[in-house]
Image: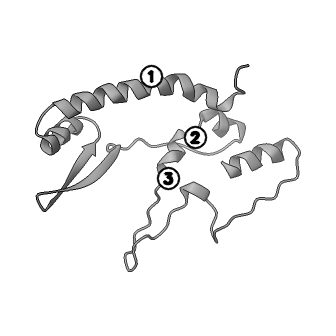
Amino acid sequence: NGLVAAAYLARAGQSVLVLERLDTTGGAAVSTRPFAGVDARLSRYSYLVSLLPLKIVRDLGLDFAVRKRTVSSYTPVVREGRPTGLLVGGDRTRESFAALTGGEREYAAWQRFYAMTQRVAERVFPTLTEPLPA
């Protein structure tokens, strides 16, 4: 967000100064060690980089590629004192919904919701890098 705006301004000939609150750059996509004593770096927002429009990548001449994951998301749940969760990704999604909810109803509702959000995204996403129409 901020770095992209700064890069566009600099390319347009403006003098730009980028200030960072943290001691490392990265903004929303920065990784941190959230658990004391555990050597694991996680980011709550790094998935957003997959939403970076190709227009920006091309405009700024970035050497950047997105790799598709087999798992879109995992939501941990504790049921009857046992850890389980909802795995969303490929063919396992239906099975995961059934195992968690005991049937097909929630999976069917999720499919309808996902299709609806996809239709909205297909209309909205192309407008993110263009001025809003009057």
Image height of 3 relative to 35, above or below: above
Q: Between disc 3 and disc 1, whose residue precedes?
A: 3
Say what amino acid the circle numbered 3 marks.
Answer: Ser
Q: CA distance from mark 2 to mark 1?
A: 19 Å
Q: Nearer the viewer, mark 3 or mark 1?
A: 1
* Amino acid at circle 2: Leu
Quickly name the residue at label 2. 52
Secondary structure of the residue carrying numbered label 2: loop
Please give the count of numbered marks on the rendered protein: 3
The one nearer the camera, 46 or 113, is 113
Above/below status of 81 relative to 23? above
Q: How far, Cα to Cα, is label 2 from label 3? A: 11 Å
Q: Position of residue 80 (x, y in %)?
A: 11, 58
- Residue in the foreground of this view, choosing between 64 and 40: 40
Q: What amino acid type is highlighted by mark number 1?
A: Arg
Say which quarter of the image contains residue 129.
top right
Secondary structure beneath dot 3 equals: helix
What mark, if any, has residue 59 been given in the picture?
A: none
Q: Which residue is at the front of the view, 80 or 66? A: 80
Residue assigned mark 1: 119
Could you tell me which residue is drawn at 13 percent across and 62 percent down? 81
Q: Residue at x 22, y 35 (%)?
A: 91
Q: Tag on residue 46?
A: 3
Question: Which numbered disc flags the more N-terminal residue, 2 or 1?
Answer: 2
Q: Quadrant of residue 79?
A: bottom left
Image location (x, y in percent) of residue 82: 13, 60
Place of residue 109 in the rendered image (x, y in percent of width and height, measured from the top left): 26, 29
